[in-house]
Image (cartoon, grey):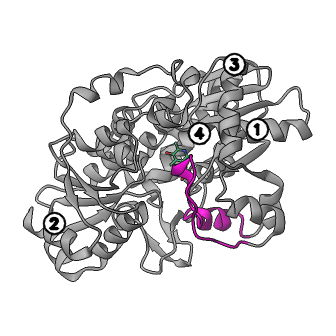
Amino acid sequence: MKFYSTNNTDLRVGFKEAVFNSMPQDKGLYMPVSIPILDDKFINNLDQYTLPEIAFHVAQNLLGDDIPADDLKAIIHDAINFYAPIEKLEDNVYVLELFHGPSLAFKDFGARFMSRIMGYFLEEGEKQLDVLVATSGDTGGAVALGFLGVPNTRVTILYPKGKVSQIQELQLTTNGQNIRAVEVDGTFDDCQALVKQAFTDEDLNKKFRLTSANSINIARLIPQTFYYFNGYAQLLKAGINKVVFAVPSGNFGNIGAGLLAWKMGLPVEQFIAATNANDTVPEFLKTGVYQPKPSVATLSNAMDVGNPSNWVRIADMFKDDANGLKDLVTGFRYDDDETLEAVKAVSDQYNYVVCPHTAIAWKALKAYQQNHSAPDTAGVFLSTAHPCKFPDVFIKEIADKVDTPPQVADLSKKQKQAVSLGKDFEGFKGYLLNNV
Ligand SMILES: *Cc1c(COP(=O)(O)O)cnc(C)c1O
């Protein structure tokens, strides 16, 4: 499969180049030149397959012969080695739990697949790959654990001091090996600015082979389609073949992958884009005007994005069908008070605890269902992170219900190892150059 830039469909590169570059020079994003449609026999019999089998079939159709079948199979079995179960909470309300990977967030799907693809394409004798990544919390943990031990790679994670939860910080700072953490005395935006400047710095580019691991990378998008197919497979097993998905959205990679799955033939009735106060997309769906704005801080901070970078991919998929997009996607936005109410309502109604991001998707699903009564359609909201990653948002009564999964049970015994830096670029550059 070749990939084009959303800014220039004549520019075409192979999968390897798209993965290592992340972004074309023209600052578009890579998309497959044609989106394959999976045959009905596969779709209608999805319940016969396991998650890795589904993942392999979907990836092979998307990638063509870029990776030989046996190698792709091995990559998928290694990367997608955890479950994504659907749980029923009440009639027509289901949760798709995407937090059973090593970092307890759905970003494990993208980060684990991407790290293994990069490891696979790195040929012997090639220069070490230096991955720089800024995180507001979840990306860092997924990328760190995704790349941990992948030969010939090194990851440098920048995170804002005091602004990530304790579990998130321990996930970033206790790995050792090829992972190092930099605690920046500043905000997430400062961290991101440092990373961006590093990519354009001549000295650093001469010395290192730099790459980014953020959600614009096509190798993070592709594996996120897998769990939509697998979610549908689990509904088929329960005799249900109509579904709406509600997706907690920030950079719109997750829902973008859902829409890609739909384009590949997954029969989804409706997608619900659920955001916090950063409501650029719900506003667009309402008014038709796409007006990015500066991000505002909320309790669901992994969704604090005012200008979602994956939106251009969605716009690209629907460039000939703007009305189709409006028919298929509904937007809802909720502020922090409503988020806390939703966390409490879910806890009270189902004795089930959701993270603040997930709570927003639940509330959006319920709002949508109020106006669209469809007894034969399952409403599925995506749970993007385990609630234990966000302990500070819960009142005690709810916090007491949150379990500690084995992935993080021993974290507090480990020693934090991070370098503390200011937000000035020279300091960061000096650190990189002095720690080869
Ligand atoms: C990253 C993240 C999101 C937002 O996902 P996008 O793909 O950026 O829309 C939502 N919830 C959690 C917990 C996340 O970590």
Disc marking residue 350: 3
Magenta span main SS: loop
- Real-space Cα distance between discs 1 and 4? 15 Å
Q: Which residues are magenta?
A: 290-319
Task: Check residue 276 for magenta coloring.
Answer: no
Q: Measuring 77% from the left and 73% from the top, which residue is drawn there?
A: 289
- Real-space Cα distance between discs 3 and 1? 15 Å
Local SS, label 2: helix
Q: Which residue is mark 1?
A: 365
228 relative to 30 in the view: left or right: right
Q: Earlier in the sequence, mark 3 or mark 2?
A: 3
Q: Which residue is mark 2?
A: 432
- The image quadrant of residue 94 is top right
Local SS, label 3: helix
244 relative to 423 in the view: left or right: right
Q: Alpha-carbon neighbours of circle 3 within 10 Å: few (<14), some, or many (≥20)?
A: few
Q: Picture coordinates of residue 284 (x, y %)?
A: 76, 66
Q: Earlier in the sequence, mark 1 or mark 4?
A: 4
327 relative to 9 in the view: left or right: right
Q: Alpha-carbon neighbours of circle 2 within 10 Å: few (<14), some, or many (≥20)?
A: some
